[in-house]
Every structure is written in C-alpha cells, then in structure tokens.
Amino acid sequence: MKSLRFLGGGIVVGLLLSIATLSLSQDRPHGPEFRAAGEALMCQCGCGATIATCAMERCHSAEPIREEIWERLQNGDSVASIVETFKERYGLIILSAPPASGFHLTAWIVPFVVLLIGAFATRHVLSSWTRHGEAMQPAVVTSISEAQRARIEKELQDLS
Amino acid sequence: MHHLGNFSLMAILVIAAYAVIASLLGVKRGSVKLTKSGERALLACTALSTTACFSLVWLLMKSDFRFEYVASYSNRELPFFYKLASLWAGNDGSLLFWSWLMLLFSGIAVVTNRNKNRELMPYVVATLGAAALFFTYLNYFVTNPFGQLGIITAAGTESWAPVDGRGLNPLLQHPIMAIHPPILYIGYVGFIVPFAFCIAALASGRLGSEWIAATRRWTLVAWFFLGTGIILGGRWAYVELGWGGYWAWDPVENAAFLPWLTGTAYLHSVIIQQRKGMLKIWNVVLVAATYLLCVFGTFLTRSGIVSSVHAFAESDFAQIFLVFIVSATVLCTGLILYRLPQLKSENELDSMVSRESGFLYNNLLFLVAAFAVLWGTMYPVLSEALQGEKAMVGPAWFNKVNVPIFLGLLALTGIGPLLAWRKSSFESLRRNFTWPLVLSLATAAVLFAFGMRHGYALITFALSMLVTVTIVQEFHKGALTRKAHKGTSYGAALVDLTLVNTQRYGGYIVHFGIVLIFIGVAGMAFDSDVKADVSPGESVHVSGYDVKLLGMKNGETPNYEWLSSELEVSKNGKVVGVYEPQKHLYKASQQPTSEVRRHATWVEDVYLVFGSTTAENKATIQVFVKPLVRWVWIGGIVMFLGTVVTLVPDRRELKLVQRSKAEAQQRLATKGKEKYEVA
C-alpha cells in the first residue's frame, strides 16, 4: 500500500515539476515567430505538411521559404506581413488556414454554429424530457415492507 | 499460387452472396436450416479469404517478381518481417488484408454467437456477407493484387519479371510501421460487428438491451485497436519522419480520428441506454456513423480526393466506394425511420443538472469535434468546388477550432463524474466540486506565478488537475466505503472496487490516460528548435542544452547505406549523453530517410536530426527541445490499460446478460401463450 501511494505521489510530483520547469525556458533560437510563420504556410512539395514540419531532405519548397522567413524576421518584418507576402506570391494554396474573410469565413464559423445549434438542441431535449418528468409526479413511498427491505439488502449484498 | 488466390476471391463472391440470400430467406421462411447454412457460408468465406491472403504472402516471401504488386513493394534483401509488412504497404494488398481481417472478425462473431442472439444472427450474417461481397468485389475486379507484369511482343503479351523489386517504402521500414497498419485496420474493421448487430436490431425490431450487450465488448475492442493504432501512428511519425511532431492533422490521420471520436461518444451514451433505457435512437445513429466513418476513412485514404503524405495514390474506385457508403447510409436511415416509434426513450430525466445531462453534453462535444475534423478535412475539396480555388486547411486551422472544443471535453471529463445520477442538489455540487475546483485554480495560480503566460496551456494544466482530483476522489470515496463495508485494507478495497465495476473504474483509468495525453500535447506550446551547419567540435545551443558535433561515420547494410553524426548533448556544462542520429539511403529505392535519436527524460525530449553534409564537410543538424512529450506515450499506455480493465467482465454485466435472457424467455412464453389463445 505504501509503495502504491509512493508511486502515485511520485507521478503527480514528477508531472508538476515537469510542468513548472516549462515557465523557466527562455532560450528560443528559432523563436515563436519563426515557428508561427512556418506553421501558417503549407509546403508546396506535395508532402501535405507545413513549412515548419516538412521533413523532406533539402526540400525545394520548404528550404528557400524557411530561409526567406528567417531573413525577413531578422529585418524586423512581422509574421502577418511575411504570410501576406507569400499569399500574394502563391495564392490561397500556400496558407495553412483559410482567410477569415468572405466565403472562407464559413470555414471558421460553421463548426461553432453547429456547436451552438447542438447546444440549443441538447438543452431543448433535456428540457422537454425533464418537464415531462415533473408533470408525472412519482408515487410517494412512505414505508417499505420487511420483505422489500430484505430484498434490497440481498441485492446490495449480491452487488458487492 | 496466384490461381489459388484468384479462385478464393471468386469463390468468396459467390459464397458471400449465398450467405446474404440464405440468411434473409431463412428469416422470411422461419427456416433454421437456411440461417445456419448462411452462417456456415460466411465461415467458408473466412477460410477462403485466409487462403487468398496467404497466397499473396507466399508470393511476397518467394520474391516472385512476375507479379506487379510483389515487384512494386518488396525486394530480395528485404528482411522477413518487412516482406510480411509489404502485404499492407500498397493499395491492392492492404485492401485484401482489410477484407481478410473483416472476414476473420465476421467468422469470430458467427462462432461466438452460435448459441445466442439467434433472432439477430441472420441479419448480422446478411450484413457481414454484404460487406464481404463489396470488399471482395474490389479485391477481385478493381484492385486485384495477383496481376502479372508482361511485355507486349509481336507474338502477344509475354510474362516478364524484373531482376529485383522496387522495395518497401523506406519510411515504412520501421518496427512500429510494421504493426501500426494492422492494428489500425483491426480498429476499422472491428466496428463492422457492432454495426451488423445494430442493423440486425433495427431490422428485427429487437431494440432492447440485447444488441447492446452483444456488442459492448466488440465495440471496446475495436475502439481499443483504433486508439492504439492512432497512438502508434503518432509515435511512428515522431521517431521516423524527423519533423519533431506526432500529429499533423493530415487527412489520413483525421480519417482514423473521426470514427474514434464517434466511437468514444457511443461508449459514453450507451451507458445511459444501459441504465435508463434512453438515447436509443442516438446510439443506433452513433454506431452506424462510426462504421460509415471507418469506410469513409478508407475511401479518403484511397480515393485520392484529398492530398496526404499517407494516402495511396489510387483514384479509380472513388465512385464504387461512394455507392457503398451512400447505400449503407440510406439503409440505416430508412431502418431508423421505420423503427422510430420503438426507439423512443423508456424514461425521463428528473433534473437538468444530472449525470445524464453531463453525458448528453459530452456527446454533443464529441460530435461537434468530429464534425469540425470532418469539415476541415473536406474544406479544400468544398472550397475548390464552390470557389474554383483550393483553400488549404492545415494545423493552424485545426488547432484554433479544435482546441476550445477539446478543452470543453476535458472539462466535462472532470465535471461529469461529479454530477449525481438523476439529480444534483446544490449541496452535493458544493461537496463534490470544492476540492477539484480549489486545486485546479491553485495549479493555474502557481503556474502563472512561475511565469507561464500561454493561455491554452494554463487552462489545460488547470483542467488536467480538475480531472485528476475528480478521479482520485472517486476511487478514494469508493475505496473508503468498500473498506468499511468489507473490512479489508485500503489497497484491497481499491482493487476490489475496480473489479466490481470494471466499466466505471476502467473508464476512470482511461480518463487519467487522456489527462496525461492532454498534458503532453500542451507541452507543444513550449517547443523550441535550432538548425545549423556545424563542423566537428562546434556546438549549437537550444533551451539550456549544448549539442556538440564530435564526428561523422558511414557504413552500409545489405538494405541501405548509412551516414551518422556523433552528437554530445550537455546541460549546464554536464554531458547527459552521446547520440548518433543517422541518414539512411535505401539501395532499392534510392530514397533517403532520417533516423532520429532522442535524449528522452520525464521533463522533455532533446530530439536530434541529422540532415545531411554540406560541400564544406559540415553536418546539418536540427535539435528540437520538446517538453512533456513522453507523457503522450505514457498517457496512451494508461488509456489502454484502462480499456483492458473495462474489458474484464463485472457483476453488472453478468446481470445485464441475465436480464436479456429473462426478457427472451418472457417473450417466448408470451408468444406461446398468444399462440395457445389464438388456437
């Protein structure tokens, strides 16, 4: 039992220590901007990955784009402007997410519209089931017989 | 051998058709002989499918390159294990393998139900037979793996064989990849049995607890394998692809994730049907949707309608697949509409705030998550069709849309068990929620004080604490009650408690596994990496680690040539390990792959990739520091242990079986009485 508690405690402490150290990491050579720009753009080599994740050897698409992102970030360009530059050059196909405007706004809002409709529908179903239940008041049980009590005891015993 | 394979496939077409007809005729005429004959026909199909599969394996083992499939996916130097894996490396072979697994499951379903569920079985066999017919039609007419290579000469087409095969894709030459597809396929095809029982229940009108009891274990097994397949796929991507991640929201990954989500929703909602006789329509819809999404996933992988690094480059049977999916959907919808009056709930809810409503909202979020994944996967096709320009949907979109939904699910994982069945009073809510809420808020406050500013990560860790405390509280309260009742030790009470209700407590273990996976995934918010060309003796620095190149080596095996860089990893000036990430160049395909190496700890992984060498004889290395990633794999293991616990039969399950038996006997008695009265 002690070892069980020790193991459980160890896992929790280990996890918390692991999580706490995250806040102390400072050194980010590639930085979040580089990663964000890379993740916002799709690789054009046909691998289906983003510029940040394409693992093709010396990829003819990802490598030059990574270099350009790096240079532009060094020059002080923002992630948004870098992404916009590539969008103008390649079209929508380079973006890893549809723009949140015009027709493509649907890509962003439809899942949440479905969530809202679903939430209303669920609430409606719950409400209708519950109202019905309230209308039908259950019979009030004032006492139970010894036979019933014995049966409950037996069933509880069977369950354990 | 190929004649045997082809003959087996042809025979399945005939015998599966017979199984369908005999089973349905058997029901119509009330002939036990016919229905039994249908079952035996399906068993014969299982044996024939095994023969067809074995024939292809034989040709692969013999390196018989007269056959296009063998020449395309294997070569002479391929180790035995990978020759076997060639069976599912290409589209034709993997579909044959799929059919075999499906018929194997069908055969097991027939054998295990030979003395039970007799009124459902003819419909079950008809459904399984129809599916076998469809997939075998594909195997024989569309994706036949026994096709031979030939040269056209003046005298006609002559058989021809290359000296060696093109070999197995090097990325697939990894132990995980050799087992990941079969495990995933077992998950996919396993859902056909619950689907067949669901169709049987709808067709026969026996919509009580019988089909639920008959399929619970099948559903859990399929769900278990699908989840294991997904985790193994992530692990393979992590250790083999060399981009430092394990999940990219690729359409083929999504295809496996979709049925997993709906299957998980079903595993929760079925509890309500078992306990309260409610959500009957919902459950049949979920089972049907899960199987159809499995088939849809196969369609996505093989039709070529979406681009994916995993997809098989074939597109000539998209329409046939669509016909199957549409037909099955129409059949399910028609049967559900026909049986609608019988699918009404037997009970009502006592309160809007109860465990039952928690389950409903949980189902809603699972379904919305599945919809969001499906929507994102299909959006490029949709946007191209409607706008004429394809808009890609990558991780950026999936993460932004799905993270809030999945955090909602994580929150419900913690909140659900704290709600009482039937009705939660204010007092019970206060009592149950106090510690989980206090500790989760404290976690967020401590992490914030330590400097963590990533919003989603903070919420994830706080919710993870909420769920963990809930689970601990549930086990602790149960164990204390049991200890008092039985007079055993706390540890014994804990084990006893779990075994008495494996479904509930196994489920909590699965929930804890999910928590660990969430924690591991949240660690991604703190990833860092560096890429540099370095000479021997030079170092790169990332997140407190120094990685120094000591030197480079090269060599070869019969299968590939290799080049490695020797990297010394230090933290705070102390050497923590020396690793040799490699580059392989496979001889048959001339395709290079990266063999990454990791310095893995409980806190983080230092992920080392050797890119290549430059003209100046420098090594291009990439170093990722990936916090908490190990917890994803540990979470996977915990999840699967939890699933194993839920598969252990408990007393409640035995009671359910007894109840369905009693129901069946009562029905028989009533029928007999009615007949007697009519007479």
Image (cartoon, coloured by chain):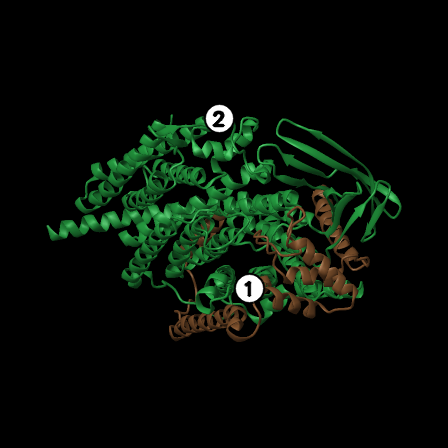
Chain colours: A brown, B green
Of the pair A8 and B323, the residue shown nearer to us:
B323
Most distant residue in the top direction: B62
Residue B15 locus on image (x, y percent):
27, 36
User: Which residue is denoted by mark 2 in the rendering?
Assistant: B63
Is residue B328 positioned above or below B118 on the image? below
Residue occupying image coordinates x 42% and y 66%: A141
Q: Tag 2, which secondary structure?
A: loop
Residue B555 locus on image (x, y percent):
71, 29
Residue occupying image coordinates x 72% and y 42%: B612
Is residue B107 positioned above or below B377 on the image? above
Q: Chain of mark 2?
A: B
Q: Tag 1, which secondary structure?
A: loop
Q: Quadrant of residue B270?
A: bottom left
- The label number, if any, that marks residue B51 in the structure image: none
Name the mark nearer the viewer: 1 or 2.
2
Does residue A148 appear left or right of residue B175 in this picture?
left
Of the pair A30 and B441, the residue shown nearer to us:
A30
Amino acid type for the residue under numbered disc 1: Leu
Residue occupying image coordinates x 33% and y 34%: B9
Residue B256 locus on image (x, y percent):
50, 50
Does residue B615 appear left or right of residue B51 in this picture?
right
Q: Earlier in the sequence, mark 1 or mark 2?
A: 2
Most distant residue in the left direction: B679
Q: Between marks 1 and 2, how big is the CA–CA gap?
A: 61 Å
- The label number, if any, that marks residue B419 in the structure image: 1
Q: Label 1: few (<14), some or many (≥20) within 10 Å?
A: many
**Residue B402 in view (yes/no):** yes
**Residue B418 in view (yes/no):** no
